[in-house]
Amino acid sequence: MPKIHEIHAPEPNVPKHHTRLTLDQWRKWTEWPMTGAAVVFLVVYSYQVLARPASTIVTETIMNIIWVMFATDYIVSLILSDNRQFWFFRHLFDLATVVLPMLRPLRLLRLFMVLKVLNRTSGLALRGRIAIYVVGAVTMMIYVGALAVYDVEQYAPTRQIDDFGDAVWWAFVTVTTVGYGDYAPTTWQGRLVAAALMLGGITLIGVVSAMVASWIMERVQVGDQKAFTKTFEAQMSRELDEDAQESATRDANLEAKIDALSAQLAQLIAERDTNAVHDSSTDTLTKRPDRT
């Protein structure tokens, strides 16, 4: 008997869904590595600028490796963005820090990623996180600005900033928008760093002003709320007292009416008993036999 082979229906061609890497996922994966790279870049760059080693091969190699990481992160982010043209125009500064070698000190601004990560993972209230962010941003901006301007100004023939202490003082004065004018950058790279510090200082002043204004408005609202609560409680207490007095008056009137009705009822009962006794006596005299 011939074998009957089972005929299987062909499986439908089900398209396999491949999970596409998104920009948010890439940012999430590279957030801490790029933050660590920025910290290493700051340490190495600070050593190279302040210590002035005889050989900069090691430091330059490390910073070039980190530069490759920054460039890779920029290219991958551009590819993964949904609207590449929009993302490109929004990140022109990142492109400039990657492409132009003379803007290498401004790559230190990537360190603000540290503040963003700490600010997001902090369990403090919103105002506390803003305060930490502002303090950290001001400190980092002053140090990074002083380091960057000292790097580009230390070999300028017409320099006014001769040491790192002068650079820190200049950065502090510039960030706070005081501008004494005792020190000023003479190179165009230094003036570019100064412009970045000025814009950053103005932005931070706006954040601080908004935070203080928010705190004042909250205090005013709390005071108004307490005053309203106090007034409301006093009014409710007065109304409750008036209701209690009216209720006591109503109870007294009701008791008086009940007493009057009770007296009337007792009087009616007494009259009824008297009439009953009188009727009983009359009936007895009427029914008595005449014995004469």
Image: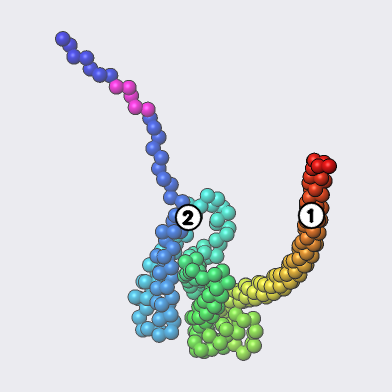
Q: How is the image coloured?
A: rainbow
Q: Secondary structure at mark 1?
A: helix
Relative placement, left or right, of 207 versus 71 is right
Residue that protrudes farthest toward the top in the picture: 1
Q: Which residue is rendered at x = 71% and y = 72% of the image?
A: 230
Please give the label number shown on residue 57: none
Seen at 40% across and 69% down, the residue is 36
Q: Which mark is residue 24?
A: 2
Q: On residue 270, which mark appears?
A: 1
In the image, residue 47 lies at what x, y percent? Answer: 40, 81
Q: Nearer the viewer, mark 1 or mark 2?
A: 1
Q: Residues within 10 Å of mark 1 (few under 14, many from 20)?
A: few
Quadrant containing the N terminus is: top left
User: Where residue 266 sits: x, y (%)?
Assistant: 78, 56
Given residues 289 and 18, the one toward you in this image is 289
Q: Is residue 257 visible?
A: no
Q: Secondary structure at mark 2?
A: helix
Which segment is the magenta one? 8-12
Position in image of residue 263 (x %, y %): 79, 58
